[in-house]
Image (cartoon, rainbow, N blue to C red):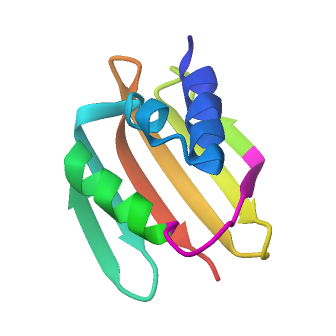
Amino acid sequence: MNNKEVLAAFFKAENERNWNIYQRFLHSEISWQLFGKEEKKIIGVENYMQVIKKAYSNTDAQFSCVNMQISSDGNRIVTYLVNNFGARSLDIFDFKDGMIYREYEFILD
């Protein structure tokens, strides 16, 4: 599975709330920087999973990837995501060993 396919499967698992599959795509040294109303940095799979589960605890939001750009080596993927409520984000994913190693998420709405 190449990194584009990994990310597509990751997004599918997130929309389905299949957290067991979802966390399999996260590198053990995952770092997620979230830039919204405030800046947060989440380190480690356990912390990442707590934050993502909490974010989805009271919503049925689904999102789609409107645009995806892939670096020449395939280890960085930039996505433009929009959920069914119209909220947008720009997400940058770095890959290591075929897993998501770093995520930078910029909330636009």
The total number of labels drawn is: 0
Magenta includes 65? yes
Residue 67 in percent (x, y) is at: 77, 48
**Magenta part of the chain:** 56-67
- In this rendering, the answer to whether 27 lies above or below 37 is above
Residue 92 in percent (x, y) is at: 50, 50
Q: Toward the viewer: 86 or 101? A: 86
Q: Quadrant of the N terminus?
A: top right
Q: Residue at x 41, y 19 (%)?
A: 98
Residue 104 in percent (x, y) is at: 42, 57
- In this rendering, the answer to whether 53 lies above or below 96 is below
- The furthest residue to the top: 1
Q: Quadrant of the C terminus?
A: bottom right
Q: Toward the viewer: 17 or 76? A: 17
- In this rendering, the answer to whether 23 lies above or below 16 is above
Magenta includes 58? yes
Q: Is residue 89 left or right of residue 67?
A: left
Q: Residue at x 74, y 63 (%)?
A: 82
Q: Residue at x 33, y 17 (%)?
A: 97
Q: Is residue 14 left or right of residue 21?
A: right
Q: Residue at x 52, y 66 (%)?
A: 56
Residue 59 in percent (x, y) is at: 62, 72
- In this rendering, the answer to whether 5 lies above or below 29 is above
